[in-house]
Image (cartoon, rainbow, N blue to C red):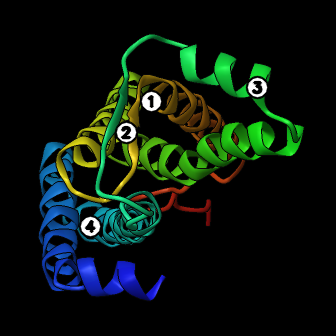
Amino acid sequence: MQQGFAAFGWLIPWICLLLVLGGLGTGVAAGYRRRRAADCASLAVITSAIWAATAVTALAVLIVVLQPMGSAETAVNVVPFASLTALLSSSVEGSVALRNVMGNVLLFVPVGLCAGLLTQVVRQPRWAAVLGAATFSLALEAAQFLLPVGRAADVDDVILNAAGAAVGIAASVVIGRSIRVRVGPRPSSPS
């Protein structure tokens, strides 16, 4: 973990700056669409909080996925389910395959959750959250291929990450329906 912070610690100030600017910009733009100053301020705060959670989640995923392992050699798999099939058929211990599958799925559940909440707050379609999470996963695999971290770039990881993001997005829909965040003036009560 310390190697990860040493390698990517310089990103933290830039991510914080992008969080603040992205959250405020998104909130202000959404507020102007509604033409209410109160909506704009409330939405900016909510959006900024979700952006912050998204950035922390993305940074944690970066640290986990790009932490150097072993040699600087890079392996590539572009055949869907090939490495999973090989892992399941040749693994002496079944827990290795289970850890690989569950690790890749669970790693992206928070990413999907944050992306899903963000698309709800700024009123974007859910496919934007799916596309964003899949693009992030694909970018991580490309980074594993390009950087000398000794990791395998694998299409199976992208598939499993997308499955985890889908679980997170589904959870964001349930959360969004159960906790309706009301932005704007409250209905007045009869006097």
The residue at which mark 2 appears reads as 137
Q: Nearer the viewer, residue 56 or 157?
A: 157
Judged from this view, the residue extending furthest toward the top is 79
C-alpha separation, residue under disc 3 versus residue under disc 4? 51 Å
Where is residue 162? Give x, y as percent: 50, 30
Residue type of the residue flagged with mark 4: Ala
Which element carries disc 3, helix, strand or loop? helix
Residue at image mark 3: 90
Q: Is residue 12 above or below residue 64?
A: below
Q: Is label 1 in contact with label 2 (beta carbons under 8 Å)?
A: yes
Q: Quick one: label 2 or label 3, which is nearer the N terminus?
A: 3
- Cα separation, mark 1 vs mark 2, equals 6 Å
Question: Which secondary structure lies at badge 1?
Answer: helix
Q: Judging from the image, what secondary structure is the residue with disc 4 in?
A: helix
**First along the sequence among labels 4 and 2:** 4
**Comparing marks 4 and 2, which lies closer to the viewer?**
2
Q: Earlier in the sequence, mark 3 or mark 1?
A: 3
Q: Residue at x 79, y 33 (%)?
A: 91
